[in-house]
């Protein structure tokens, strides 16, 4: 198995000109090559040399907000809401997939 990835992104993007809200955006494309023959396809085609090749697209949008500054310069508490879209194209049809992932949490910066 070998994978190569190209990633582009913008960090700390502030379209609303506020100090408490920022956005991060990333896009990645990954090429995945499998060196061993696939064990699923030979059952259908009889070809034991068939190799799986995938192309993975990942788009991430994240909103960050500052919630509170701690006393005595001990850092900042923040929150985030993140949405990921993952699209996996494969030459093995039952391995094609789409994923939509939403996550949220707290951050601490010191």
Image (cartoon, rainbow, N blue to C red):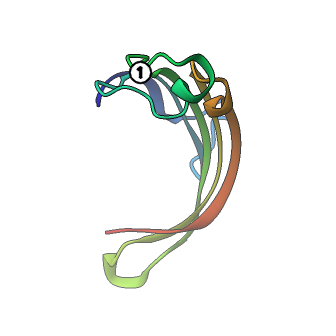
Residue 52 place in picture, x, y as percent: 45, 22
Q: Quadrant of the C terminus?
A: bottom left
Does residue 73 appear left or right of residue 57 in this picture? left
Q: Nearer the viewer, residue 104 or 93?
A: 93
Q: Nearer the viewer, residue 21 or 80?
A: 80
Q: Residue at x 52, y 25 (%)?
A: 42
Q: Nearer the viewer, residue 85 or 8?
A: 85
Residue 81 sits in quarter: bottom right
| Numbered circles on residues, count | 1
Residue 64 place in picture, x, y as percent: 58, 52
Residue 99 sits in quarter: top right
**Relative to 109, does residue 99 appear above or below in the rendering?**
above
**Relative to 89, does residue 70 appear above or below in the rendering?**
below
Q: Mark 1 highlights which residue? A: 48
Q: Quadrant of the N terminus?
A: top left
Badge 1 element:
loop
Q: Residue at x 67, y 33 (%)?
A: 97
Q: Nearer the viewer, residue 92 or 105?
A: 92
Residue 67 place in picture, x, y as percent: 60, 68
Q: Residue at x 54, y 66 (%)?
A: 78
Q: Residue at x 37, y 16 (%)?
A: 49
List the single residue furthest toward the bottom: 71
Residue 11 place in picture, x, y as percent: 45, 34
Does residue 67 appear left or right of residue 16 in this picture? left
């Amino acid at each position: 198995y070998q994978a190569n990835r190209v990633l582009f992104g913008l960090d700390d993007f502030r379209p609303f000109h506020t100090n408490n809200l920022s956005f991060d955006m990333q896009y990645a494309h990954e090429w995945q090559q499998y060196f061993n023959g696939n064990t699923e396809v030979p059952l259908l085609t009889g070809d034991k040399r068939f190799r799986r090749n995938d192309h993975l697209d990942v788009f991430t949008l994240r909103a960050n907000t500052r919630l509170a500054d701690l006393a005595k310069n001990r850092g900042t508490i923040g929150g985030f809401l993140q949405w990921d879209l993952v699209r996996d194209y494969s030459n093995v049809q039952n391995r094609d997939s789409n994923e939509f992932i939403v996550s949220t949490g707290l951050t601490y910066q010191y």
